[in-house]
Image: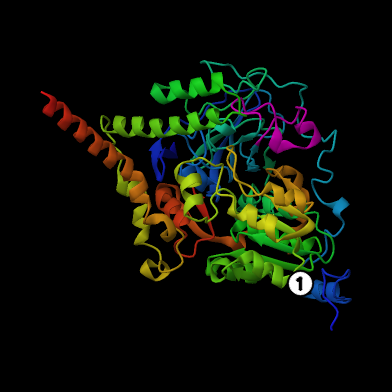
Amino acid sequence: MTEPATPYMAGRSATPDASVALRARIPGWGVDLDPKDRPSFPREQPGIATGAHWKFPDRQPEDQPRERSIEHAMLTPAFGTSVPLKGASGAIRRYAYGRYSEGRAAHWLLLIAADRVDAWENHLASFASLRPDNPVTETGIGSEFSGHGLASRAGQRVDVNHSWMDPVIVAGPWVLAGLAGAAVLRAVRRGH
Amino acid sequence: MRAMVYRGPYKIRVEEKDIPKIEHPNDAIIRVTTGAICGSDLHLYHGMMPDTRVGSTFGHEFVGVVHQVGSSVQNLIPGDRVMVPFNVYCGSCWFCSRGLYSNCHNVNPNATAVGGIYGYSHTCGGYDGGQAEFVRVPFADVGPGRIPDWMDEEDAVLLTDALPTGYFGAQLGDIVEGDTVVVFGAGPVGLFAAKSAWLMGAGRVIVIDHLDYRLEKARDFAHAETFNFAEYDDIVVHLKKETDFLGADVVIDAVGAEADGNFLQHVTASKLKLQGGSPVALNWAIDSVRKGGTVSVVGAYGPMFSAVKFGDAVNKGLTLRMNQCPVKRQWPRLFEHIRNGYLKPSDLVTHRIPLEHIAEGYHLFSAKLDNIVKPLIISATA
């Protein structure tokens, strides 16, 4: 019987000149060979000169109440002001931040739910604005027809696996809710 | 100014927004000349990342010109050409002082488990990003660096995330000479990780994806062996066969939250948001690495739990390493590699899209049309 191969026995097939061949073939092969001579080694390296010329940074003014994780002892010295809390989605987010730590699933599930509410709030509000949402331009669907056209579209796109189920999953709850609503109405009418 | 604005899942548009203001004495306002769409922006675009608010501007990969500086800024003056790491960080907290810039504790009030990232939801601090004509850059004395005169702007923009993250992914693998390294994902980060694995002395580099044009790039750009997982009944078994049934020494997950999972994974992760991502690539990594090997994770995952095969990781004695990349720590070495011709990051750029057409850019990138690998966003003021 022939000897079992690695890993059933110790040792791997020897390739003594492998690195010579690789160095010839791959530009820069092995220039960072020593793990101790790689950037970010060691992972934590005390005393790095970062350019900070403060022991603790100045504090950014809190012009309006800013939500924060309850895992923080205080509002951080700097923070983003991209989109302040507002509306029903803002109320959900305020509750998620105020009540639950990042360790709780409820924290993240509430934030995800608030994102959906936020999208609908803004979608509806856009119809009362001078620039309503436009599903054609905002989804970038026009790019289906630019570039190299149909030739580059067949077989290589990544959304074919799921796109068939997207309408069902996205529209399904609305259709079911509509049917349920209609059934309730019918029941109420029959009751009279 | 003109800026990309999120309108809800799969919907964005370009709007007129106020030019950002100095809000902290160490802020700078940067006029963006070139930005990029990152694969992880797609998680925001798809509505995967909690607290992504309608009205926010994405974009954590950008370079530009200093437009204005706050009263305590000492290292930059208006007119400087700068590249900005995707990490927002203070430089002085417990974590920054140890070089863990991506774990800064002073810039993200919304979470302690993740640092600040430009244009990456309120979970990452609520900062607007650089897919706009101007962007606010906090701690301007700490984060941005001047673009060297010899450096191409398109190389510089890839040094703000994709290249350092790929390099960092290889570094987290603790590669030693002769190691077999498998990289899941042939996007820019995966391709840079594969390329970096050679610099660290890998003996064999294998890249796994399901898009042939990206695998072709992995062969040409990163000198890698490639396998299309869609062509195999079980890619893990195939990788075992390829490695004498030992498994790879190091596996790098450069896919993250939206791995192309099965129906159940797609519904629970992408549609119902009940997982922090579809952990298909991560589980394949755990399965295909050898016992005692190292799995390095640089793909982006959300904060929710994911159904990861942790028992296998325990029983195989694996080392799991992961983090967001502390970008600026990688720069000096990567600058050298670019100068020496070992790396040419802009070779991955396939599309240059004007900011006004960014919605089309997102759709192209999301559906992987037109052989897209890396799209840059060109500002109207560039």
Q: Position of residue B33 (x, y in %)?
A: 54, 46
Q: Does residue B331 appear in the picture of this structure?
A: no
**In the image, what residue occupies the spot 63% across and 41% down?**
B86
Q: Position of residue B90 (x, y in %)?
A: 70, 29
**Magenta residues, as a range?**
B88-112
Q: Position of residue B378 (x, y in %)?
A: 49, 50
Using residue B295 as the reference point, say whether residue A134 is left or right of it.
Answer: left
Residue situated furthest bottom in the rendering: A1
Q: Position of residue A120 (x, y in %)?
A: 35, 33
**In the image, what residue occupies the spot 68% across and 26% down?**
B106
Q: Quadrant of residue B364?
A: bottom left
So how many labels did they put on this image? 1
Residue marked by disc 1: B244
Using residue B202 as the reference point, say whether residue B5 is left or right of it.
Answer: left
Q: Quadrant of the N terminus of chain A?
A: bottom right
Q: Quadrant of the C terminus of chain A?
A: top left
Closest to the observer, A110 or B120: A110
Tag 1's secondary structure? Answer: loop
Closest to the observer, B21 or B177: B177
Compared with residue B233, is residue A65 higher up or lower down, i.e. above or below? above
Display coloring: rainbow
Compared with residue A36, is residue B289 higher up or lower down, i.e. above or below? below
